[in-house]
Image: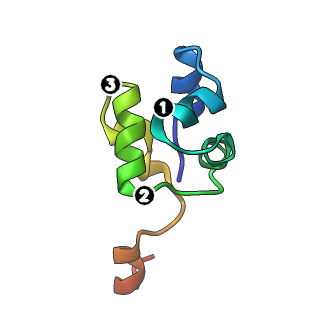
């Protein structure tokens, strides 16, 4: 899933490790989210959005994601 995590993190001057500490995950987890190798749970996405004082949708760009949602997959949408 596309996201603005790196941009937002760097705007606050946070390292991946510092952001991870704020939300209770490893630096590697933050890296994996930033590089779109891992999609966070809704709770982790919420915690991340709270660090940046914005909505989940401002961090995670659902419209730009090439991956189909589970609902789209189950309906057979293209």
Total marks placed: 3
In front: mark 1 or mark 2? 1
Name the element at disc 2.
Answer: loop
User: Circle 3 is placed at which residue position?
Assistant: 53
User: Quick one: quadrant of the C terminus?
Assistant: bottom left
In front: mark 3 or mark 1? 1
Q: Position of residue 7 (x, y in %)?
A: 57, 26
Q: Residues within 10 Å of mark 1 (few under 14, many from 20)?
A: few
Nearest to the observer: residue 8 or residue 61: 8
- The image quarter in which residue 71 lies: bottom left
Q: Residues within 10 Å of mark 2 (few under 14, many from 20)?
A: few
User: Circle 2 is placed at which residue position?
Assistant: 41
Q: Residues within 10 Å of mark 3 (few under 14, many from 20)?
A: few
Label 3 or label 2, whichever comes before in sequence order: 2
Residue 53 visible in the displayed image: yes
Label 3 or label 1, whichever comes before in sequence order: 1
- What colouring style does the render use? rainbow
Q: Residue at x 37, y 35 (%)?
A: 49
18 above or below 29?
Answer: above
The residues bearing labels 1 and 2 have C-alpha atoms spaced at a distance of: 16 Å
Nearest to the observer: residue 77 or residue 9: 9
Horizontal side, residue 71 vs residue 11: left or right: left
Name the element at disc 3.
Answer: loop
Label 1 or label 2, whichever comes before in sequence order: 1
User: Circle 1 is placed at which residue position?
Assistant: 22
Q: Position of residue 16 (x, y in %)?
A: 64, 31
């Amino acid at each position: 899933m596309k996201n603005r995590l790196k941009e937002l993190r760097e705007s606050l001057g946070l390292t991946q490790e510092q952001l991870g500490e704020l939300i209770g995950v490893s630096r590697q987890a933050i890296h994996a989210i930033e590089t779109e190798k891992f999609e966070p749970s809704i709770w982790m996405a919420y915690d991340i959005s709270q660090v940046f004082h914005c909505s989940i949708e401002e961090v995670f760009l659902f419209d730009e994601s090439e991956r189909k949602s589970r609902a789209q997959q189950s309906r057979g949408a293209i």
